[in-house]
């Protein structure tokens, strides 16, 4: 099993210092002069031959004008995890990479490591496009070639949101301004938003019969200044769509600026990011930051109670929990994942530090998958990762509101969790022994990067184990092995 990080390892930030210096186009001598240290001492720090002392860390943050938490964030650990997952691709099966190899690569050249990951993503997109192209040619002939190039902007948007820790202060402030200007009240927020649309933007809200278009739930006519909402939308969804439209009207410059990011590399990515950010704004309007945080704390993050207080659904509350990262007024750092019955991950975010699969199937031991066995019920899990970190997670299925008798009801599951040391703040942890290692469920990220050989649910051999097949012995898993370390 891979060794845990030591305190000494956590101070090895030389790669980050070197990357910041190069980004500023400074020599070692120039940065050393600004820090009032010798160039030789700075050279030792950059090569991790000397730890970075706290006073010098504070000085670095001042010199580069960055937040201290940004400097010591867990970006490197996340990058290591994502690279390990990428290297689990069968493409690299003959390459015997160890955890230490990848960690050293990220530490020495974080920028090159990020570009390597970006290159792998481009490769997977090209491979998917080629596979789809071949399938379409086989099914429909060469006339389908014109639309064979597919893009996956959702990955870019997920990266953008993760980099911002799913917190956008500008949108929070704009949402609070709407509350003041519109004089909103939770008990009558739908009427207040409709009044605000009409008074400030001369926009009328019209409820449209389902017979006029079942597939369109919201449509704004900028010429006639009419916001059409389908009668199929429940009340809370109509309210959310009104707030979303207000965001598009009042925060369009902010949305454009936030979507103008290098991570969002295509017009499709930026368009999807604007939609996601408008949804963020809508959530901030329906669940204003300070009142929502106060309710979350007083009710100990009881999703159902908080949801009823703010007239929103289970998923909206879970998502809002993950955004409570205002400096000096933070909530519990959560991770969140949303999947469908096929295991496709359609939403993911991690402030807890847990690693969520990106390029391969996620570990089936996560309780979010088991949630489909007990629809509508909350399932609890204390899970332990291979590195020893422990998490407390809840999971529950969601069923979308019906669009009519003949409509197929999509079922999804939401997983919400935090590090086990925060679990006592959640009502769901009552009566659970959070310190008992024996009751914790061993989980991983994906089979290919998990070193546990004794897992009965293992679907693929691990990159971290030398595969050893003994035809005379059948273990829990066919892919049992011995450690390469």
Image (cartoon, rainbow, N blue to C red):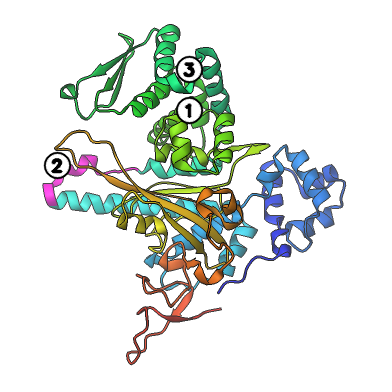
On the image, the x and y values in percent for residue 432 come to 53, 60
Residue 28 appears at what percent x and percent y? 78, 49
The alpha-carbon separation of the residues under discs 2 and 3 comes to 44 Å
Q: Residues within 10 Å of mark 3 (few under 14, many from 20)?
A: some
Camera sees residue 264: no
At a point 45% along the width and 22% down the height, the residue shown is: 187
**Considering only vertical position in the picture, is 99 above or below 271?**
below
> Are discs 1 and 3 less than 8 Å apart at CB?
no
Residue 62 - label:
none
Q: How many angstroms separate mark 1 from mark 2 (CA)? A: 42 Å
Callout 1: helix, strand or loop?
helix
Classed neighbour count for the residue bearing mark 1: other residues with Cα under 10 Å, few (<14), some (14–19), many (≥20): many
Look at the image and tell me whether residue 95 can be seen. yes
On screen, residue 14 above or below 448: above
Q: Which residue ends up furthest to the bottom in the rendered image? A: 472
Residues in magenta? Answer: 139-151
Q: Predominant secondary structure in magenta?
A: helix
- The N terminus sits in image quarter: bottom right
Secondary structure at numbered mark 2: helix
Q: Which residue position holds label 2?
A: 143
Magenta-drawn stretch contains 385:
no
In-image side of 148 versus 243 (left or right): left
Query: Which numbered disc flags the more N-terminal residue, 2 or 3?
Result: 2
Which residue carries the number 1 mark? Answer: 281
Q: Nearer the viewer, residue 419 or 339?
A: 419
**Residue situated in front as seen by the camera: 155 or 207:** 207
Residue at screen point 29% across, 49% down: 129
């Amino acid at each position: 099993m891979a060794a845990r990080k030591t305190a000494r390892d956590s101070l090895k930030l030389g790669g980050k210092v070197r990357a910041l210096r190069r980004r500023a186009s400074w020599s070692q001598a120039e940065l050393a002069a600004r820090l009032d240290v010798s160039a030789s001492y700075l050279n030792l720090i950059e090569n991790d031959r000397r730890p970075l002392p706290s006073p010098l860390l504070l000085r670095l943050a001042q010199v580069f004008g960055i937040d201290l938490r940004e400097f010591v964030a867990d970006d490197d650990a996340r990058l290591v995890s994502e690279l390990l997952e990428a290297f689990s691709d069968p493409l690299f099966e003959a390459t015997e990479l160890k955890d230490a190899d990848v960690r050293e690569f990220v530490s020495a050249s974080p920028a090159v490591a990020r570009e390597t990951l970006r290159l792998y993503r481009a490769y997977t997109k090209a491979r998917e496009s080629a596979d789809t192209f071949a399938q379409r040619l086989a099914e429909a002939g060469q006339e389908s070639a014109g639309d064979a190039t597919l893009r996956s902007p959702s990955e870019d948007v997920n990266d953008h949101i993760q980099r911002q820790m799913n917190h956008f202060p500008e949108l929070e402030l704009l949402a609070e301004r709407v509350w003041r200007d519109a004089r909103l009240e939770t008990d009558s927020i739908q009427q207040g938003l409709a009044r605000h649309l009409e008074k400030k933007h001369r926009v009328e809200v019209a409820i449209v019969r389902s017979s006029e278009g079942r597939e369109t739930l919201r449509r704004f006519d900028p010429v006639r200044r009419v916001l059409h909402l389908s009668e199929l939308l429940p009340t809370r969804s109509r309210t959310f769509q009104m707030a979303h439209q207000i965001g598009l009207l009042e925060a369009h410059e902010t949305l454009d600026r936030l979507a103008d990011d290098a991570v969002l590399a295509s017009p499709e990515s930026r368009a999807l990011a604007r939609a996601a950010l408008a949804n963020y704004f809508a959530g901030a309007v329906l669940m204003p930051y300070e009142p929502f945080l106060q309710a979350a704390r007083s009710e100990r993050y009881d999703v159902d109670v908080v949801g009823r207080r703010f007239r929103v659904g289970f998923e909206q509350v879970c998502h809002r929990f993950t955004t409570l990262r205002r400096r000096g007024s933070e909530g519990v750092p959560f991770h969140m994942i949303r999947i469908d019955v096929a295991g496709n991950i359609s939403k993911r975010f991690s402030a807890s530090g847990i690693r969520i699969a990106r390029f391969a199937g996620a570990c089936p031991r996560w309780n979010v998958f088991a949630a489909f066995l007990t629809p509508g019920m909350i399932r609890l899990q204390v899970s332990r990762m291979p590195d020893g970190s422990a998490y407390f997670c809840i999971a529950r299925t969601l069923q979308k509101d019906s669009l009519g008798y003949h409509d197929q009801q999509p079922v999804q599951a939401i997983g919400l969790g935090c590090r086990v040391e925060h679990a006592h703040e959640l009502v769901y942890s009552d009566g659970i022994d959070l310190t008992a290692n024996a009751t914790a469920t061993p989980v991983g990220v994906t089979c290919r990067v998990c070193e546990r050989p004794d897992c009965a649910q293992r679907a693929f051999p691990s990159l971290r184990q030398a595969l050893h097949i003994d035809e005379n012995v059948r273990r829990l898993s066919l892919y049992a092995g011995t450690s390469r370390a």
